[in-house]
Image (cartoon, grey):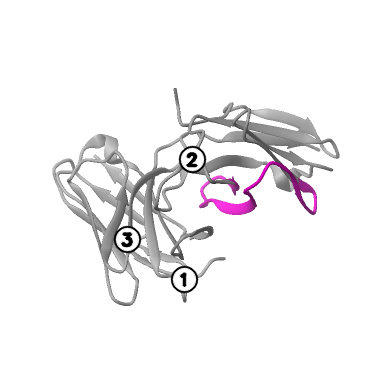
């Protein structure tokens, strides 16, 4: 079982729709959860972090965490063509250092 | 753009050679992590340095080694290059104990022929 699992996609949504990206993780003791956006040929950029169960909203982005189900999601409202990128779910495990474990990433395509 | 810089941008080496990649941290950041990102994959954690000491290592062989300098800049060294080492190598700096301050540099694209 992979430590962080994501569907690689592509996920295609029409402009203006809600894009829903999902991620599961295997380490029940995981501490922190992140969503990164990576444009083709560029490095990852942190867009959301979440640490406790529930929802966290930042602009058009909402991260959702359910530790009991070991599930993290990212909702992007009013999707724009500029949101087209690969979205990486990342987790820091239980333990003393900052190793960040990434999923394979989900490629999102927003169709104008 | 983040304040993390990496050099070189691109590099082509042949199998068996050695390579050194460099990273300068964002101002105020004392921790550096290195990741390998193969095409179509997520970044894989290689190791992390804090206060010039290795502070954690992923599932990479000893031919991957690193250094951190007093100014928090860092090097990644790879010996005996293999074809599978072809990847984007990412450096990320952060404050110790604070993964949500992790900022990535632009990466070095290594091609091994």
Q: Please tell me which of labels 3 and 1 falls first in the chain.
A: 1
Q: Helix, strand or loop at disc 1? A: loop
The vertical placement of A57 against B4, above or below, is: above
Q: Residue at x 43, y 36 (%)?
A: B39
Q: Which residue is mark 3?
A: B49
Residue B51 percent across, percent down from the top left: 31, 69
Q: Which residues are magenta?
A: A34-61
Q: Secondary structure at mark 2?
A: strand
Residue at 81% from the left image edge and 38% from the top image edge: A112
Tag 3's secondary structure?
strand
Marks 2 and 1, how far apart in space? 22 Å
Up-down relation of residue B30 to residue A106 (above or below)? below
On-image quarter of the N terminus of chain A: top left
Q: CA distance from mark 3 to mark 1?
A: 14 Å
Among the 4 quarters of the image, the one containing residue B86: top left
- Residue drawn 53% across the image and 42% down it: A90
Question: Residue B76 at x, y = what percent?
Answer: 27, 57
Q: Relative to the observer, which residue lies in front, A104 or A99?
A: A99
- Nearest the viewer among A19 and A72 is A72
Left or right position of B69 against A21: left
> Answer yes or no: do the residues labelled 2 and 1 have beta carbons within 8 Å?
no
Report which residue position mark 1 lands on. Answer: B26
Q: Looking at the picture, do discs 2 and 3 lie on one chain?
A: no
Are there few (<14), some (14-19), or many (20+) residues within 10 Å of tag 1? many
- The dot on residue A102 is 2
Measured from the top left, where is residue B36 in percent x and y? 37, 45
């Amino acid at each position: 079982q992979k430590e962080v699992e994501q569907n690689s996609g592509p996920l295609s949504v029409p402009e203006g729709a809600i894009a829903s990206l999902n991620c599961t993780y295997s380490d029940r003791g995981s501490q922190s959860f992140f969503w990164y956006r990576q444009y083709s040929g560029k490095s990852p950029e942190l867009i959301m972090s979440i640490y406790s169960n529930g929802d966290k909203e930042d602009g058009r982005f909402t991260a959702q965490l359910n530790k009991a189900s070991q599930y993290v999601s990212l909702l992007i409202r009013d999707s724009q063509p500029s949101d087209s990128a690969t979205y990486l779910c990342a987790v820091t495990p239980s333990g003393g250092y900052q190793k960040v474990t990434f999923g394979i990433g989900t490629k999102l395509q927003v169709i104008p | 753009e983040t304040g993390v810089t990496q050099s070189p941008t691109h590099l082509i080496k042949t199998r068996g050679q050695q390579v050194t990649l460099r990273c300068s941290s964002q101002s105020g950041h004392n921790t550096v992590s290195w990741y390998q990102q193969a095409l179509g994959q997520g970044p894989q954690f290689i190791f992390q340095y804090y206060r010039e000491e290795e502070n954690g290592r992923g599932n990479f062989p000893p031919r991957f080694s690193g250094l951190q300098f007093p100014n928090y800049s860092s090097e990644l060294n790879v010996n005996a290059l293999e074809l599978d080492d072809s990847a984007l190598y990412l450096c990320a700096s952060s404050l110790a104990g604070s993964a949500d301050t992790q900022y990535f540099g632009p990466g070095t694209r290594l091609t091994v022929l």
